Image (cartoon, helix red, strand yellow):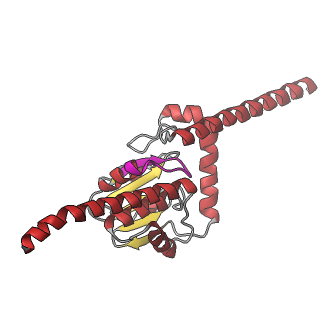
Amino acid sequence: MLNMSFVGLGTFERVWFFAIVWLGCDLVVLGIAHTCGAHRVFGKRPDGLVALWGWFVFLPLLLGTHAIWHIVRMAIREPAYNVVSENLVIGRRLLPFEVDEEFANYVDLTAEFAEPRAVRRLPAYTCFPILDGSAPTPSALGGFVSSLRPGKTFVHCAQGHGRAGLFALAVLLKSGAARTAEEGLVKLRSVRPRVGLTAAQRQCIEQYANYLRLEESLSDSNLQPAVVGKIK
C-alpha cells in the first residue's frame, strides 16, 4: 500500500513537472511571437476557430487563458459591450446568448480564443487576430479598417480594453469622428472607462493617425489646382 502511494506521488510530481515545462516552453514561443508580430501563432483561422495543432502545442497556456477570462468576466462589474456611436460598438468576447443585435461587421480581434459557433455563423463575422497587449502594423490595421462594410460595427477582444480600443480608435479616426488618437481615446473611455493601450498599441495608432493626416493633406493638395482652375 505504501509502495503504491509512493508510485502515485511520483507520477503526480512527474505530471506536474511536465505541465510546468510545457507551459514554460509555450511562454517562450509566445514571447518570440510577440517580438516577431506572429499574431496567428495559436493557429487562429479565418473562420474563428483555433486549429487543432494550436490546441495541442499550447494546451496549458490556452486552458489557463480561458480560465482567467471567465474569472475576470465574472469579477469585473462591466457591461459586455458599450455603444460608442450609431455605427460603433466596443466590447469583450461575447457568449452565444449575449449576441442580440445585427451588425454589418462583427470584428473578432482575439488570437487565443475560438469564437462561439453562434457568432462564427453570423454573416458579419470577420477575424483579425492580434496578440494580447500587442499591435499589428499600421498598414495592416488600416487595410482591415478600410475593408469594413458600411453600417454598424461590433469590435471585441478578450475583455474589450486594449486590442478592441486600438481598433475602435482606428475606426473613429478613419470616419473622422475623432481628429486625434487622444480625442478618440477620451470618447471611448467616456463609455467604457477601462479602455487602455499598451506602448506598442499607442505607437501603432499614432502612426496610423499620421498616415491618415498625410493622406488627407495629399488629397487636399491634389484638389487645390483643380479648384483654382475653376475659379479662373
Above-or-below relation of 158 to 2? below
Q: Residue at x 71, y 34 (%)?
A: 19
| Viewer-side residue, 113 vs 219 | 219
Question: Residue 109 in the image: x percent, y percent?
Answer: 45, 52
Q: Residue furthest front?
A: 232
- Asked if residue 94 can be seen in this view, the reply is no
The residue at the point 66 percent across, 33 percent down is 25
**Which quarter of the picture shows residue 5?**
top right
* Relative depth, front residue between 15 and 167: 167
Find residue 155 and report its image quarter: bottom left
**Looking at the image, is 191 positioned above or below residue 73?**
below
Highlighted range, magenta: 126-139
User: Which residue is pictured at 45% across the width and 62% down the height?
Assistant: 98
- Please indicate, yes or no, whether residue 6 appears anywhere in the rendered image: yes
Question: Does the magenta run of residues contain 178?
Answer: no
> In the picture, which quadrant includes the N terminus?
top right
Q: Depth check: 105 or 167 in front? A: 167
Q: In this view of the protein, which residue sits in the foreground, 168 or 222?
A: 222
Q: Position of residue 75 (x, y in %)?
A: 65, 64
What residue is at 48 percent from the left and 62 percent from the top? 165
Residue 48: x and y in percent read 42, 45
| Quarter placement of the C terminus | bottom left
